[in-house]
Image (cartoon, grey):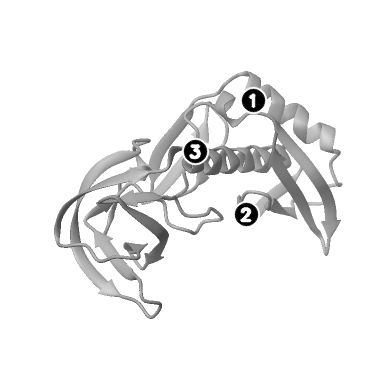
């Protein structure tokens, strides 16, 4: 099992031990470390970018309870340095945190988030109705979100029944394995680009200014 350092740390550099190296079908090498700072693709979020031992990480994927890093070159077993690209990490963390806020705002309007996609240029939250909820106005959602951003609520991470939970201030916590900003002011301006109801579900598309 790979220890996921990004669950509890915002560090972008660190060291780990290479414990397994396996070639894949595309000529790359699957590098397994004993612990990692790299978030894999999944949970609605793209993978981190960066370098391991100075070699560019071309992908990060989850295999059961292991995290596999895809590199163009093999690595020898032993200690290596990890460097996560700060710009990409911040972009993904901002998008994911914004998605949580949209989910929370939707809940206050009678909708329950059931699916989320936090990719750059493709942000979307899908909700199921709780009872007979009406389609909310964009302004209703943004009023709530802007207040939370202005309050600069701090992130809280906890573990409940084996699940990693992420919340901001006293807002509802969501089970989540993704990366998030430490304080909501770092999210910046959230823009809702489309909102519609389709087949009984509320679809909210969003981006960041």
Q: Quadrant of the C terminus?
A: top right
Q: Nearer the viewer, mark 1 or mark 2?
A: 2
Residue 117 is labelled as 2
Which image quarter: residue 192?
top right
Residue carrying label 3:
87
The image position of residue 59, as x and y in percent, is 43, 61
Pick whichever of labels 1 and 3 is earlier in the sequence.
3
* Residue 70 appears left or right of 76: right
The image position of residue 39, as x and y in percent, is 41, 51
Callout 1–callout 3 Cβ contact below 8 Å? no
The image position of residue 34, as x and y in percent, is 21, 56
Residue carrying label 1:
148
> Can residue 173 be seen?
no
Q: Which element is circle 2 on?
A: strand
Q: Residue furthest left?
A: 78
Residue at position x 65%, y 39% from top?
Answer: 104
Q: Disc 2 versus disc 3: distance between alpha carbons?
A: 19 Å
Q: Residue furthest bottom?
A: 25
The image position of residue 195, as x and y in percent, is 82, 48
Crowding around mark 1 (Cα neighbors within 10 Å: few <14, some 14 to 19, many 20+) is: some
Q: Residue furthest top?
A: 151
Residue at position x 31%, y 69% from top?
Answer: 29
Pick whichever of labels 1 and 2 is earlier in the sequence.
2
Q: Nearer the viewer, mark 2 or mark 3?
A: 3
Q: Which element is circle 1 on?
A: helix
> Can residue 169 be seen?
yes
């Amino acid at each position: 099992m790979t220890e996921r350092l990004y669950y509890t740390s915002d560090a972008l550099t660190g060291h780990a031990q290479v414990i397994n190296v396996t070639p894949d079908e595309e000529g790359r090498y699957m590098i397994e470390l004993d612990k990692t700072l790299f978030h894999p693709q999944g949970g609605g979020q793209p993978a981190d970018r960066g370098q391991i031992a100075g070699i560019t990480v071309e992908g990060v994927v989850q295999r059961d309870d292991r995290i596999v890093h895809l590199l163009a070159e093999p690595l020898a077993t032993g200690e290596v340095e990890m460097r996560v690209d700060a710009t990409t990490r911040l972009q993904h963390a901002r998008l994911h945190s914004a998605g949580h806020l949209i989910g929370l705002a939707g809940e206050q309007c009678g909708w329950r988030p059931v699916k989320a996609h936090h990719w750059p240029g493709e942000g979307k939250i899908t909700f199921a109705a709780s009872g007979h909820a009406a389609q909310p106005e964009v302004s209703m959602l943004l009023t709530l979100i802007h207040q939370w951003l202005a309050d600069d609520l701090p992130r809280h991470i906890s573990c409940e029944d084996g699940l990693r939970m992420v919340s901001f201030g006293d807002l509802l916590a969501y089970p989540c394995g993704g990366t998030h900003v430490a304080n909501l002011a770092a999210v910046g301006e959230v823009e809702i680009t489309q909102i519609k109801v389709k087949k009984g579900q509320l679809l909210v598309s969003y981006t960041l200014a």
